[in-house]
Image (tube, rainbow, N blue to C red):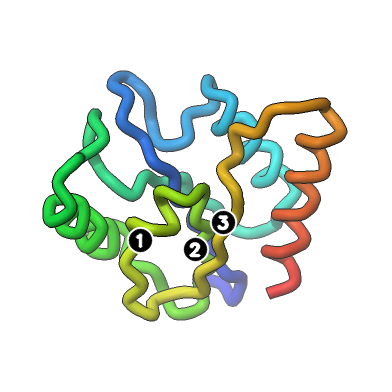
Amino acid sequence: MNNMKRVIFVGLHYKSDYKALDSFTKSGKVIDAIIEKLPNECIKTNLYDTDFLPSDNNYRDTLAVEWHHTWSPYPDDIIVLLGSLVHNGFINRNNGIVIKVPHPAIRGSENKIAEYIDRIVNEITNI
């Protein structure tokens, strides 16, 4: 691997027939716009590898630990947690640099969305 940090986006997905942060969704389109502005290798993931939102806290914790086994973040990877449900559900194992940002399915004008994209790109590139 080169010296450039990977950026791992972590969303919360529980819809069948869609990939993590799928480009067909509003959130996925926003993340795609962020990725286009980054030179890093970028990975789109979901915290829970399910087609439903788990309600049991123990099961959520198990799935959050499994996320680490699946993605094996390096110490210098940038892990971008998208939204408060992911912020609260993510188990930080001190693998990677974790940043918490608002959920990308923001509502509003194109300017507001562009500001969100630029803010996240700046936060990632300034690490």
Mark 1–mark 2 Cα distance, whole angstroms, equals 10 Å
**Among the 4 quarters of the image, the one containing residue 91:** bottom left
Counting residues from the start of the chain, the first of labels 3 and 2 encountered is 3
Give yes or no for contact between labels 1 and 3 (Cβ–Cβ under 8 Å).
no
Which residue is nearer to you in this view: 58 or 104?
A: 58
Give yes or no for contact between labels 1 and 2 (Cβ–Cβ under 8 Å).
yes
Q: Which residue is mark 2?
A: 79
Instruction: For label 1, count other residues whose C-alpha is less than 10 Å away and answer few (under 14), some (14-19) or many (20+).
Output: many
Please state which amino acid type lies under the numbered disc 1: Phe
Q: From the viewer's perspective, is residue 62 above or below residue 125?
A: above
Please state which amino acid type lies under the numbered disc 2: Ile
Residue 113, given in percent of the width and then of the height, sits at 76, 35
Which residue is nearer to you in this view: 114 or 103?
A: 103
SS for tag 2? Answer: strand
**Among the 4 quarters of the image, the one containing residue 124:** bottom right
**Residue displayed at 33% across by 59% down:** 71
Mark linked to residue 43: none
**Residue displayed at 52% across by 74% down:** 97
Please state which amino acid type lies under the numbered disc 3: Glu
Q: Say whether residue 110 is left or right of residue 39.
A: right
Q: Which residue is mark 3?
A: 41
Counting residues from the start of the chain, the first of labels 1 and 3 encountered is 3
Q: Which residue is mark 1?
A: 90
